[in-house]
Amino acid sequence: MFHNLNTIQSLLIQRPKARRAVLTTVVLLVTCLVVSWQNLQFYLLYDFNVLLALLVAPFVLYLREPGVYSSRYGWLALGFLAGYFFLKIQVCFYLGAMSFLLLVVESRHGKLNNLPLFVAALVSPFTRFVSQVLGVPIRLELTQLAAKMLQPIYPGIEAKGNVLHLGEATFSVDPACMGLNLLITGLLGTLVVIAYHEKKRKCALPFWMACVLAVLAFVLIILSNLLRIVGIVIFDAPPETALHDFLGLFNLAVYVWLPMLVLVPLVFKGLDRLLPTKDDATLPSKPIYRQRWPKLWRGVTGTLMVLILASLTYFNANREDYRNNMVADSLQPMEMAGFQVTVTKGGVCKMLNGKALIYIKPSVGVYGADHSPLICWPGSGYSLKNEREAVLAGHTVYTAELSNADGSLYTAWWYDNGQHQTTSQLDWRWRMMLGEAAFQLVNVSCESEAELQRQVGRLMGRQLFVQN
């Protein structure tokens, strides 16, 4: 009886503290969103992936050590914001704000597991950029591999760009076959499996091992897409059919989630001796430094929060200065006879006449996101299809077809620094790291393929840039 009375008295004493902790958390979270919203709204795009992440979050995130407070995400937030200041990489601002939100939770309620930042990163601009830009060479390579795998069954099949041709039938490997939705769905499913076994075994998977499993899941997603393409041809399942969608979900479940359901428990079993559990008697209820110097800990954490909020406020107010990581370059586009030339505030040079539309987009840093046509054209209301790497006028370029309600265009693009032309993201970034001149993106669009080839040959055959 006395024990029960003591328990009730303890709860009555702690309840006001719990209410204050929740109220403080809400105030800090709202403050963070208010001081950084104008910047965050460009990155927190309301779409299927954000909605899916919100639905999955309760199954992935949990308080692993309630009452054991931590400021680890505060230092991480400062690191991200320092990177944003020096590198002007947009995703650093986003991850800095997300890290602050995690700091608020861990400094008021207790330590979370090691997966929250994975969820935040999956719906970040970086994942979107990687999927939309690097997804093209991956899809082109998958199309070639699928054609080779199918040749013993269909000797006449051939791959042209991202399209498989089998007699009169064509099968297009569209962005959905290696797109953002499928990538995030596969990785979020992997995180759910990891979180389930963390709760079951009362231990957290080390961050490095979670990274290894995420990379492995990414490789399995690519493999599942390859087998999906093969299945689409064998079962003649064109897009926008129930069979097409079923094959996608089937391959994702069988070749990604099922292996993870088998592998993750084995990983935990192998690491049991290395992972401390909540039942471990040697695990303190609070970190030693917080027990010995609680006022100092609170002071350091409070200072971290003030610095982070001040940084977010500053960057939000001066967001135009950090919009893109432009590189100071002495090369400027040459004037071309017969073209009307305009230069936007962002430094994009637009050349237009009755036959062609040319964009020369300014250089970005080695780690910056370039103005890829794969992102800019869809943002202008166009859809892309038949993307491929082609040789026009003796030069290798990326080509695609653009279409909207008003009609269609043929477009080509490459990267150029006045001395070297390339289509490879890795190539131009590596060359810039070695000290070569900054690369600018050249994008040419015409109403016919013949005119596109003529314009590309004309541009490749002349000096595009002059010294500023």
Image (tube, rainbow, N blue to C red):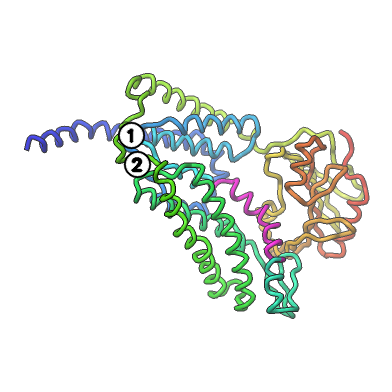
Structural crowding at the residue carrying mark 2, measured as other residues with C-alpha within 10 Å and reported as few (<14), some (14–19) or many (≥20): some
Q: Say left or right for 16 vs 347.
A: left
Taking the spot 38% from the left edge, 34% from the top edge, the residue there is 27
Q: Quadrant of the C terminus?
A: top right
Q: Position of residue 73 (x, y in %)?
A: 47, 33
Q: Quadrant of residue 438?
A: top right
Taking the spot 39% from the left edge, 40% from the top edge, the residue there is 112
Q: Residue furthest left?
A: 1
Label located before the other in sequence (2 or 1): 2
Q: Position of residue 235 (x, y in %)?
A: 60, 78
Q: Nearer the viewer, residue 117 or 450?
A: 117
- Marks 2/1 in contact by CB < 8 Å: the verdict is yes
Which residue is under mark 1? 283
Q: Amino acid at mark 2?
A: Thr
Above or below for 153 versus 256: below
Q: Does the image show residue 417? A: yes
Taking the spot 74% from the left edge, 80% from the top edge, the residue there is 167
* Secondary structure that dominates the magenta span: helix
Q: Say left or right for 103 vs 431.
A: left
Q: Position of residue 278 (x, y in %)?
A: 32, 40
Q: Which mark is residue 429?
A: none
Q: Nearer the viewer, residue 468 or 230?
A: 230
Which SS class for mark 2? loop
Q: Nearer the viewer, residue 305 or 377?
A: 305
Where does the magenta region start and end? 122-144
Which residue is under mark 2? 277
Q: Position of residue 87 (x, y in %)?
A: 65, 33
Which SS class for mark 1? loop
Q: Amino acid at mark 1?
A: Leu
